[in-house]
Image (tube, grey):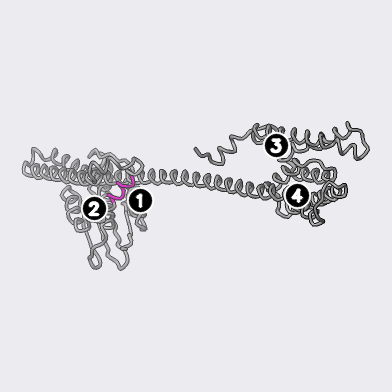
Amino acid sequence: MTTTGEEFTAARGGPLWWTRWRSAAFDWSLALLSAVECAVEGVPFARDAGLPVAAGVVFGLLAGSVLVVRRQWPIAVVLVAIAITPAQMGFLMGIVGLYTLAASELPRRIIGSLAGMQLVGTLIVTFVQVRQSMDRGHQTVGDWFIPFAALATSLGLTAPPVLLGLYVGARRRLMESLRERADSLERELQLLAERAEERAEWARNEERTRIAREMHDVVAHRVSLMVVHAAALQAVARKDPDKAVRNAALVGDMGRQALTELREMLGVLRSGGPRERAVVPLAAVGVAAAAAASRAVEEGEGPCLEELEELVGQSAAAGMVVDLSVEGEVRSYAGVIEQTAYRVVQEALTNVHKHAAGAKTHVRLAHRVAEIAMQVENEPPPEVGSASSAGLPSGGNGLVGMKERVVGLGGVFVSGPTEAGGFRVSAVIPAA
């Protein structure tokens, strides 16, 4: 299994500057080997320099143990190796130090400079050793062998560790880059998932709000008219049986219309087969419902402006004095625009039934070049408190729903009392 950069960093934990205990044990082992090597090589160095053997051994132990700090201070290790090269000591320390230096994050010019110094130091020492050996008669090869042996030895001790260190350092940086990229992709995927969930939640909230508005418009208007007709039916049942029969028929028609509109809305929510609903994730239900609702509106399912006369006639049949006036050239609009205009007029008439029963109401519709405007204005009710006698409750969401509909289409909605004591609802919706 692969681990991301954050998990890799969290998994590390060693003493001092070491990232892992295994790395610390490995460096201490190398330092011990280097110290033993330098101690052994310190014996001939002490004899050649005329020093006590113990001093050479101690010097070798101290110099070789510097390798333990190779990860933290690689420059210091290489400098110590260069310094003890004339004493023919620290070959292991020089090789490991150059490898660590090349694999580090130090600038290339520093790595090249120190590697060059180590190469020159090894070259000089090797040249001197080979020449002394030939002078003593240990070697019988020609003079060309001295520079060749010195160059080959110095390159063999410096070039391989430097090249290997450069390769390992580049590979390590590549792996770190890949880990960072994996972390970045993981964070981006997590952010995208969170945003998708937020969009799905927003779509579900929008769909719930839309359904609430539709339910409010249908139930509030139809049921309000049914309550008004039921009250009138109760009043005239004994005095005028024929009128009572007509009112009862109107109540039945309005109830059937309300059920039809409710079935249409439920049909939109149930659009799509059982198999499709089974495989769609819960987070996408709100998006799918909103898209289905939008398609239903665009395809013309729902009320339109041609039904305004019928809407006004229903309010007139319930006893409201209402007149409808249309200005401009009548034309068709997008389904969502016509439905919004219809719902605004419907909700405004419902509010008149609730709060100003018996008040004369004027409904105006204006077709303009780039917009459609509507206004519903009622005069003061003839009797204060007549709405309460009909028993019509108010949830206070009618005006809010109308404004949300109109503003959602880029229109303007204004409502408020008039100077004469009535109430006016005005809305302007762009035609496009």
Q: What residue type is labelled 1?
A: Glu
Q: Distance between the residues labelled 1 and 4?
A: 86 Å
User: Of the residues under marks 2 and 3, which one precedes in the sequence?
Assistant: 3
- Disc 4 or disc 3, which is closer to the eye? 4
Depth check: give the residue in front, 114 or 41.
41
- Measuring from the top left, give residue 76's x and y in whole percent: 78, 43
Name the residue: 57% across, 46% down.
175
Circles 4, 2 touching at the beta carbon (< 8 Å): no
3D distance between C-alphas at marks 4 and 3 = 34 Å
Horizontally, is 203 left or right of 36 in the view?
A: left
Query: Which is more N-terminal, label 4 or label 1?
Result: 4
Badge 4 is on which residue?
153
Residue drawn at point x = 36 percent, y = 42 percent:
283
The residue carrying pointer 2 sits among few (fewer than 14), some (14 to 19) or many (20 or more) residues within 10 Å by Cα, namely: some
Q: Which disc, if any, is residue 404? A: 1
Q: What element carries label 1?
A: helix
**Dot in front, 4 or 2:** 4
Residue 360 marker: 2
Which residue range is magenta in the image? 286-293
Badge nearest the viewer, 2 or 3: 3
Q: Residue at x 35, y 51 (%)?
A: 403
Where residue 304 sits in the image (x, y, percent)? Answer: 22, 56
Residue 411 screen position, x and y as percent: 36, 58
Relative horizontal placement of residue 175, taking residue 162 as reference (left or right): left
